[in-house]
Structures are given as C-alpha cells and as structure tokens.
Amino acid sequence: MRNIDEDTITHAVLAAMSKCRDDRLLTVMTSLVRHLHSFAREVTLTEEEWAHAISFLTDVGHITDERRQEFVLLSDTLGLSMLVTTQNNRKPAECTEATVLGPFFVKGAPEYKNGDDMSNGAKGRPCFVSGQVRGLFGEPLADAEIEVWQSDENGFYDVQYADPLEQGGEFQARGRLSTLPDGRFHFRSILPEAYPIPHDGPVGRMLDALGRHPWRPAHLHFWIKAPGYEPLITHVFRNGDKYLDSDAVFGVRSSLVVDWIEHPPGVAPDGVTVTTPFFTLDYDFVLNPAEERQ
Ligand code: BEZ
Ligand code: FE
C-alpha cells in the first residue's frame, strides 16, 4: 500500500478494513469513510479547518461527564438524534409520534398514584394533566407505565440545579404512575416553560457561529411502556410557544402540539380549590403493537 494519492485513498482505507469480522460494523464504517472523504473533497477541507474540527471535538469530550453529555447535544442540534429516532419509530399514522429522549431523563424517579402532585415542590403555575393510553385499535391499556419529566418555571430540570439541596435534595417535577383499568391517568404538576439547551460549551459556540438560538419550546416528556406494545418516548408541546417552529433539536411534530387551557382561580379537576390561575392538559397516547419476534 504505497503511493496512495487523493484519488485512491478512499479505496485504500476500505481495503484495509476488508477482514472485519462484523458485517454490520463493516457496512457502517464503509459508508462513514465514503461520506467523510466525499465531504472533505466537496468542501476542499483545509488543514486549518481540519485542526479546528479536531479541537472542537476535543472540547466536546472535555466538557462531557456523568451530568453533561455534550456529544448527545451535538447530535441533537445537528438533527441526527431526531433522524435516528424517526427512522427507528415508523408506525401507523394513528399512533402517537416519537421524539427525542433528551439528556434530562433520570432513572429512579418516584412513583405516584393517579391524582398525586408530581411537582414535589418545584416552582411553577399549577397544571393538571390527564389522558388515556390506548392501543392501535382503540383498546384502553390498563396498567401502562407512564414516566413524566419536565422543566420548572425557570426552565430548569431538577438535575440542572448546582445544589440539589436547593430543591430539598429530591426529584422534582418528574415521576412514574400507572394507568387505571380504563387506560386513563391524571396527575397534578406545574406548567413547563421553554428553556435553552445547555449552551455554555462548544455546542453553544457552534450554534452562535451558525446564527442559531439554543431554545426549546415548552414541553412535557413522556415515556410510556405497556406489555405487548412498542415503548413510546415523546413530548407534548404547548401550543402558542414562540419556539415551536425553531426548536434547537428539531423535535417538534404538529401532532404533539396541544392547547394547554388556562383557567381562573377556582375548583381544579381534582376537586381542590386553587387560589391562582391554573392550566389543564388532556392528551391521549396511542401505542403500536410490538412485532412478534420469531
Ligand atoms: C430535552 O427536551 O430535555 C432536551 C432534548 C435535547 C437536548 C436538550 C434537552
Ligand atoms: Fe425537555
């Protein structure tokens, strides 16, 4: 393998991998090398640009730790996460669409009963959420597991506060509950607010250089699981939010944009009197039956 030039280098790299024993790895790496080389040729990548890219990726690695995943943020802001989500969640049009998981999901959130207040002290305007989980043919799904997480009135998730004691050292505005025998669920929480994705690192600098903002429209995250059905990871967005058409991570789908209704102070759906204005959201989820695996 000598005297490789700019025309033969792609073939040389592909030939060097030909003994790969993993078929899928070979397929993926062959395509990656081809596309990377064509990209460098198409833009006639300069040495300075190459060095800049290496330094950018190094910064992405340096800022990443157990609490901060800058590589996922990079994938999200380049639309790769949503592309991978969409092409791996094709289903009938009647089913609820999937969207990105995001970096703020954490395992081990508390379990609640229907009617409980999931905010657990997080600050925000009261919001009463209800809905039904059904299968593709309209069948109500009892005992489906619903996991919810959301931002507070400052646009922060509990895990973003530097001092966890600031919120009593407990999970806030996140939790798990199960659907009732008729597939319905209801809980109290707070109104989620729009927020900027973490933008004090290399991804933020990239967005700025590209003339992009880091904001996501207000949304509530749901992860729903029921035996015999494909799990659903999605959000419900607040209609009217000014970032719906420019979500920094391209996660909005029209079918997931819903009116959250504002009510004057008074009796809330759970029968409790609320002394401030409050919101209600009612949204049904439709799960796709899982494919039978042979
Ligand atoms: C989120 O919705 O929690 C999220 C998704 C992608 C990047 C940052 C945040
Ligand atoms: Fe979010």
Image (cartoon, helix red, strand yellow):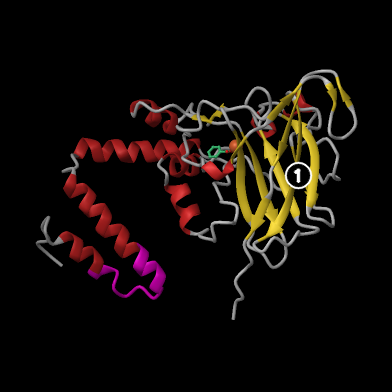
Between 275 and 61, the one nearer to me in the picture: 275
Residue 252, image x and y in percent? Answer: 51, 40
Magenta region, residue range? 15-28
What residue type is disc 1 on? Answer: Ala
Q: Quadrant of the N terminus?
A: bottom left
- Choose top left, top right, bottom left or bottom right for residue 263: top right
In the displayed structure image, the side of residue 191 where residue 215 appears, left or right? left
Residue picked out by circle 1: 109
In the displayed structure image, the side of residue 202 where residue 251 appears, left or right? right
Between 31 and 248, the one nearer to me in the picture: 248
> Is 19 included in the stretch rendered in magenta?
yes
> Is 61 included in the stretch rendered in magenta?
no
Residue 275, image x and y in percent? Answer: 85, 18
Q: Quadrant of ligand 1?
A: top right
Task: Examine the rendered structure and indicate whether residue 242 appears above or below residue 27.
Answer: above
Disc 1 C-beta below 8 A from ligand 1: no
Task: Examine the rendered structure and indicate whether residue 278 appears above or below residue 290.
Answer: above
